[in-house]
């Protein structure tokens, strides 16, 4: 049995396995009998591929309450975030180009903002409160006449905290700033309605909701379309905003994953909430642990816990039977403590002693029991040898 | 950091980390030396039982990454029988090579060396 077969997977916030129902749809696209035609071609093969893409586009759009024609496909949330942040700020340079975001955003947004600063844009980084929430008052104070974009993630990938997106959207609309939301973690787990929430741009990725890697989408409200400057050029696909031949099987898989999420997401969220609380209760037999996010305002499947006295990397290393992380898998090359936890005001040692448990579709109550027992064992061992 | 971290670390570190037989306070130790802090991300305390001019047994307590714990265990195994004039083998660079540690971990080994130096000073 391989390591991956033995390990209990608790890293669904990093990526999810492809749902077998999704894989089946994708496999049907491959081969000569499938949908291999270039969707830009006008012959029968191309038209068949195009029809499948448009069906999938409708499924993805339905998940977020958007008209299908306002959705463009990308390679994933990183590209969507880059296109939204760089595209709007560059397109609105003449209006001042000021951007507002939050210190706890994903690197795909933060690094895009750093690039904007190198290009001469001004960026304001809001500091959330200790639970990770951004206040409307902070945002109101930061907004200026020259603010062209506000980018706030729906649910944080490390601590799971969920922002009040509708309230932020309303504030942005009043001030005339475009509002971008990275919904990579929340899509399929929380209800999203881009129109009711007054969202102008929204990033999605398939691989966080049991779809394939390498495909994502960006919702663009019609009022933002003209302001958005593309990042890549070529065949003019996706209304000229994202050139490149569309990967039919990936898009079909994405559509299938969104359809399943729409039908099953609510029940799954309730189940994950119960499992997450079971995990927290079981871990709570350890003294002096700290929950790093507000239970009432976080994603149902994410639990971030600090185990003071047990260094995080050693803790992970002592738990080969569990697949989890000390933070974001996207920051894997660094042994620095999580910048998200540091932004919440945690000291270095507490941040370094934190683990993120992210539960998903295939997590069972038995997994939770085994995982909690293993973590308690290892924390006790490391604390016992700590000075 | 990858989802399953353990297989990415060198075999020597894995082997030592899973057998920290010398971890914990050492009964009857007369010499102690400590360095670092939890806030720094690494804290080490060595305990030595000594007999005349020789180390008879060694133990340690440590907070830190797997390389830190593996290095402490490796040293605790190597210390018994060594003399007061040369109480520990090699230096942090050599320990890092032995454990195939990446360069950014050297700082942890310097803290371990400080703890050993503190123990050596306490022996006097």
Image (cartoon, grey):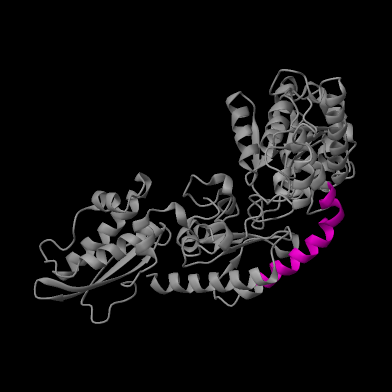
Q: How many labels does the image show?
A: 0
Bounds of the magenta segment: A259-280
Q: Where is residue B90 in the image (x, y as percent from the top left)?
A: 19, 54
Residue drawn at (49%, 44%) of the image: A333
* Farthest-out residue, bottom: B28
User: Overall secondary structure of the magenta stretch?
Assistant: helix
Q: Position of residue A139 (x, y in %)?
A: 74, 43
**Image quarter hosting the C terminus of chain B:** bottom left
Q: In this view, does B60 lie above or below A242?
A: below
Residue A264 falls inside the magenta stretch: yes
- The reply to whether the magenta stretch includes residue A265 is yes
Q: Residue furthest front?
A: A33
Please provide percent x and percent y for residue A110: 62, 38
In the rendered structure, the answer to whether residue B106 lies left or right of residue A90 reads left
**Foreground of the two, A258 or A140:** A258
Which quarter of the figure has residue A5? bottom right
Q: Which residue is drawn at 9% across and 75% down?
A: B52
Looking at the image, residue A161 sits to the left or right of residue B98; the answer is right
- Regarding residue A163, the answer to whether it shows in the image is no
Residue A37, percent across and down? Answer: 79, 26
Specify whether residue A303 is in view. yes
Q: Is residue B14 left or right of residue A161?
A: left
Task: From the viewer's side, name the closer residue of A188 and A156.
Answer: A188
Q: In this view, does A122 lie above or below A61?
A: above
Q: Which residue is drawn at 74% across and 34% down?
A: A31
């Amino acid at each position: 049995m391989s390591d991956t077969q033995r390990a209990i997977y608790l890293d669904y916030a990093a990526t999810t396995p492809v749902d077998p129902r999704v894989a089946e749809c994708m496999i049907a696209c491959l081969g000569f009998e499938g949908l291999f035609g270039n969707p830009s071609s006008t012959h029968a093969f191309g038209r068949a591929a195009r029809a499948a893409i448009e069906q999938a586009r409708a499924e993805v759009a339905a998940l977020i309450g958007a008209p299908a024609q306002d959705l463009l496909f990308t390679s994933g949330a990183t590209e969507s975030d880059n296109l939204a942040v760089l595209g709007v700020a560059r397109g609105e340079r003449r209006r001042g180009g000021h951007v507002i975001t939050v210190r706890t955003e994903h690197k795909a947004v933060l690094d895009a903002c750093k690039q904007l600063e190198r290009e001469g844009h001004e960026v304001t980084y809001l500091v959330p409160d200790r639970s990770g929430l951004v206040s409307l008052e902070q945002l109101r104070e930061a907004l200026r006449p020259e603010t062209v974009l506000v980018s706030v993630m729906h649910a944080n990938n490390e601590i799971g905290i969920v922002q009040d997106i509708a309230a932020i959207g309303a504030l942005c609309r009043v001030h005339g700033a475009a509002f971008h939301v990275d919904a990579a973690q929340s899509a399929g787990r929380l209800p999203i309605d881009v129109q009711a929430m007054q969202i102008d741009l929204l990033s999605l990725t398939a691989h966080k909701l049991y779809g394939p890697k390498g495909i994502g989408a960006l919702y663009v409200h019609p009022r933002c379309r003209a302001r958005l400057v593309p990042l890549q050029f070529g065949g003019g696909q996706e209304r000229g905003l994202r050139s490149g031949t569309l990967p039919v099987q990936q898009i079909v898989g994405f559509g299938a994953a969104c359809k399943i999420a729409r039908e099953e997401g609510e029940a799954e969220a309730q189940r994950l909430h119960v499992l997450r609380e079971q995990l927290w209760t079981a871990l709570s037999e350890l003294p002096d642990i700290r929950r790093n996010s507000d239970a009432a305002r976080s994603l149902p499947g994410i639990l971030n816990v600090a185990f003071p006295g047990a260094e995080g990397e050693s803790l992970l290393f002592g738990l080969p039977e569990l697949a989890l992380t000390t933070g974001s898998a996207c920051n894997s090359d660094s042994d620095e403590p999580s910048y998200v936890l540091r932004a919440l005001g945690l000291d270095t040692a507490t941040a370094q002693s934190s683990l993120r448990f992210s539960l998903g579709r295939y997590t069972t109550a038995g997994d939770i029991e085994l995982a909690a027992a293993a973590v308690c064992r290892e924390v006790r061992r490391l604390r016992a040898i700590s000075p | 950091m990858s989802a399953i971290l353990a297989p990415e670390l060198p075999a020597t570190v894995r082997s030592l980390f899973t057998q920290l037989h010398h971890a914990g306070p050492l009964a009857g130790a007369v010499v102690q030396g400590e360095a670092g802090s939890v806030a720094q991300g690494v804290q080490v305390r060595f305990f030595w039982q000594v007999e005349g001019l020789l180390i008879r047994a060694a133990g340690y307590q440590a907070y830190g990454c797997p390389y830190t714990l593996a290095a402490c265990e490796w040293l605790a195994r190597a210390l018994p029988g060594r003399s007061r004039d040369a109480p520990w083998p090699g230096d942090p660079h050599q320990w890092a090579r032995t454990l195939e540690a990446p360069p950014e971990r050297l700082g942890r080994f310097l803290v371990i060396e400080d703890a050993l130096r503190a123990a050596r000073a306490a022996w006097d």
